Amino acid sequence: MKEIVIISGKGGTGKTSIIAAFASLAKNKVLCDADVDAADLHLIMDPEITERHDFESGHSAIINQDKCTECGLCRDLCRWNAISEDFVVNSIGCEGCGVCYYFCPEEAIEFPLNTCGEWYLSETRFGPMAHARLGIAEENSGKLVSLIR
């Protein structure tokens, strides 16, 4: 199986247009838009989404106020100062390290996976396409690229 890859470069140089041109010429192909931070191949290909999946990666702490005794241990241990004086986690400041979650004596901190984006399997007029969209200001684009490849 041959693989043609058009990789990163300066924005606006025509990478997506070249991919669309190759897609119209190649036989037995699968398209993959791995530019999950700023995907735009879907604008040209007009895909019909056949499968939609959440992309989950990383964690964020959430303090359950009903269980919290305000002992302050979580706030003292947080090296990013992401826990306020009234024991609310700043979701932007939280790095998802889990220290607060693992050391909370009351087990008042939840630590769910973050839903960071979505990935899709679609059909286009040129054949199947895998693509994804990472949420605004979300991290772990490398993991999402690996998933759709």
Image (cartoon, grey):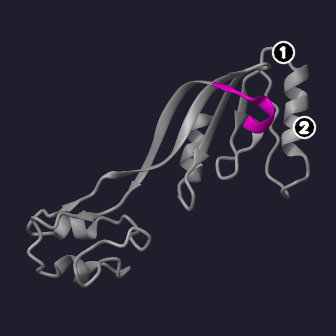
| Crowding at mark 1 (Cα within 10 Å: few <14, some 14-19, many 20+) | few
Horizontal arrangement in the rendering, residue 147 relative to residue 36 (left or right): left
Q: Which residue is located at x 15 percent, y 69 percent?
A: 104
Circle 2 SS class: helix
Circle nearer the viewer, 1 or 2: 2
Rendered image: mark on residue 27: 1
Q: Which residue is located at x 9 percent, y 69 percent?
A: 105
Q: Is residue 134 magenta?
A: no
Across and down, in percent, residue 54 comes to 46, 39
Callout 1–callout 2 Cβ contact below 8 Å: no
Q: Which residue is located at x 86 percent, y 32 percent?
A: 20
The residue range painted magenta reads 42-48
Q: Amino acid at mark 2?
A: Ile
Rendered image: mark on residue 18: 2
Q: Which residue is located at x 39 percent, y 68 percent?
A: 91
117 w.r.t. 87: above or below = above
Q: In the figure, residue 108 lies in which quadrant? A: bottom left
Rendered image: mark on residue 8: none
Q: Amino acid at mark 1?
A: Lys
